[in-house]
Image (spheres, rainbow, N blue to C red):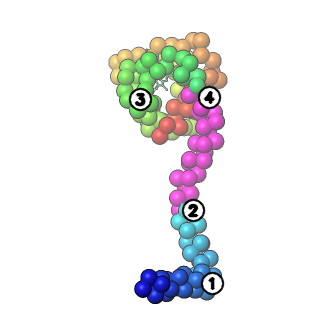
Amino acid sequence: MRMRYLAPFVLSAFFLASCGGSDNSSEKKDTSASSSNEAPVDNSMVKQGAAEAAASKGAGLIAQSDCLTCHKVDMKVVGPAYKEVAAKYEPTDANIAMLADKIISGGSGHWGEVPMQAHPNVTKEDATEMVKYILSLK
Ligand code: HEC
C-alpha cells in the first residue's frame, strides 16, 4: 500500500529532477532574483557587517567608557536610546563627525533638557568608532 502511493511521488520527483533541468535553472534564477530583491537589505547588512568590524570596536569603546550609564541600546535612560539616535541620523560622514564632536564636547537640546556631559578624554578617532557603532544599530 505504502509503496503504491510512494512510487508515483518518487517517480515524479525523479522526473522533476531529471527533466526539469531548464525549469530548475529558471527556478534558480527566480530564487536568485528574489534574493537579489532582498539584496538591498542584504547589502545594507553587509555594509553594516563591514562597519561591524569597526562597530564592534565602537561597542567595546562604549563599554569601556561611561556611556552605558546614560545610554542603552533600545531604551531611553538619561540619554536617548542608541537605536533612536541611529533612527534620527543617517550614517553620513558629516553626521558621524558632528556626533563624534558632540561626544567629546558634550551637547544638549536635541533630545530634551538634560545635557550630555563632555568627554574630553575620548579621542576623535574613538568617538568616531563609537558613533559608527551607534548609527549601525538601526
Ligand atoms: C551623564 C549621562 C550621559 C553620558 C555618560 C553619556 N551620554 Fe550621550 N547623551 C546624554 C544625553 C542627556 C543626551 C541628549 C543630549 C541632547 O539632548 O542633545 C545624549 C546624546 C548623545 C548622542 C546624540 C547627540 C545628538 O546630538 O543627537 C550620542 C551619539 C551620544 N549621546 C553618545 C554618547 C557616548 C558615545 C557616550 C560615552 C562616551 C555618552 N553618550 C555618554 C547623556 C549621556
Q: Does the magenta stretch include residue 50?
A: yes
- 20 vs 138, nearest the viewer: 20
Question: Between disc 4 and disc 1, whose residue precedes?
Answer: 1
Q: Residue flagged by tag 1: what amino acid is it? A: Ser
Residue picked out by circle 2: 36
Q: How crowded is mark 2: few (under 14 residues within 10 Å), some or many (20 or more)?
A: some
Q: Residue flagged by tag 3: what amino acid is it? A: Ala
Residue picked out by circle 3: 81
Question: Between disc 3 and disc 4, whose residue precedes?
Answer: 4
- SS class, disc 1: helix
Q: How far apart are marks 1 and 3 (CA)?
A: 55 Å
Q: Is residue 133 above or below residue 49?
A: above
Q: Main secondary structure of the magenta part?
A: helix
Count of numbered circles on the image? 4
Asked if residue 32 shows in the view, the reply is yes
- SS class, disc 2: helix
Q: Does the magenta stretch include residue 15?
A: no
Q: Residues within 10 Å of mark 4 (few under 14, many from 20)?
A: some
Residue at the (44%, 30%) spot, across then down: 73
Q: Is residue 45 above or below residue 83?
A: below
Q: Residue flagged by tag 4: what amino acid is it? A: Lys
Q: Which residue lies furthest to the left in this view?
A: 113
